[in-house]
Image (cartoon, rainbow, N blue to C red):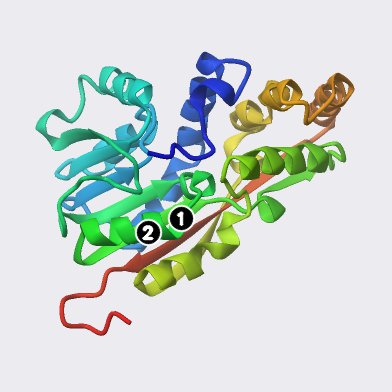
Amino acid sequence: MDPGSYNVNRSHRGRDAEVQRLAAQARLGWKKEARTLAWFGLEDGMSVLELGSGPGFITEQLLTLLPHSVITCLEIDPSLVAQAKEYLRDMGGERLHFVQASVMDTGLPDASFDFAYARLLYQHLPDPLGASREVWRTLKPGGRLVVYDIDDEIANLLDPPVPEWPLVSARFAQAQAAQGGDRQIGRRLWRILREAGFQDLDLEVIAHHSDDLGIETFLPQMDPDRALPLLRAGLLSEEEVDALRAARDRFLAAPEPYIMMLSLMVGGTRPPAGKNQS
């Protein structure tokens, strides 16, 4: 099973720091994310497949949002499965199931779920089309897949600008591409789902910004230590990492620093039985 381009142990200065960043990321704009999921058709009582569920922070939100739904968490990393089970031990009960498997080969039965959600997963997959076809198989006719992800060219707006950031962003993309990932996946999501057989496609842009949520909410995503794996891999120099730290400090010292983060949400339906699926 190919784990793709994400490794929780190599994505920050250490595992604990990365898990803390994931927790902050999951909570950063959940209210708007949940609202958009509902617009895409997510309803309480549905059977939900969470793809790439990680340490359980989004699972926690789904369990609260959908008190009558059964949530199945699919995660390839056994350490993250164990961490999620511990984190969620007092939540969900019989409504919560864990499956350790790849999205490429879930082992789940055909036509089992009403709704599948892939959050910041597709950018790490070497074969997102194959993954979409596997998810299509597990959905009931009429079931929905929604993918939430990024496209680096529109992902961040900073005021005042941080001219050091484009280089770091490009190096992140280079490192991820070398492992089969794609930080420009956002622009391809519609076509991927369409080719996999999904219909009734739609796309929304979700904006989270610091005037609404506060600058502090975004600081874990701006942590210069996130660039340390690039330093270890020889993709950034110590001088470039130091320049990034100084740039982040200058940005935060500005009178009114502003961050806007844009994400894309694309959804499609497995056609009902008998409907043209070409």
| Residue situated furthest left in the rendering | 94
Q: Is residue 36 visible?
A: no
Where is residue 132? Give x, y as percent: 37, 59
Disc count in the image?
2
**Disc 1 designates what residue?**
128
Q: Give the number of the disc on residue 132.
A: 2
Left or right side of 220 for 99: left
Left or right side of 273 for 204: right
Where is residue 122? Give x, y as percent: 48, 50
Pointer 1 and pointer 2: residues touching (CB < 8 Å)?
A: yes
Residue 246 lies, with reference to residue 140, above or below; the image says above
Given the image, on which type of amino acid does mark 1 rest? Pro
Rounded to the nearest whole Å, what is the CA distance between mark 1 and mark 2?
A: 6 Å
Most foreground residue, 90 or 110: 110
Q: Residue at x 60, y 50 (%)?
A: 182
Q: Residue at x 85, y 24 (%)?
A: 237
Q: Quadrant of the C terminus?
A: bottom left
Where is residue 175? Give x, y as percent: 67, 37
The part of the image, by quadrant, that contains residue 272 is bottom left
Q: Residue at x 34, y 46 (%)?
A: 103
Most foreground residue, 106 or 242: 106
> For mark 1, does the 10 Å Cα neighbourhood hold few (<14), some (14 to 19), or many (20 or more) residues?
many
Q: Is residue 172 visible?
A: yes
Given the image, on which type of amino acid does mark 2 rest? Ser
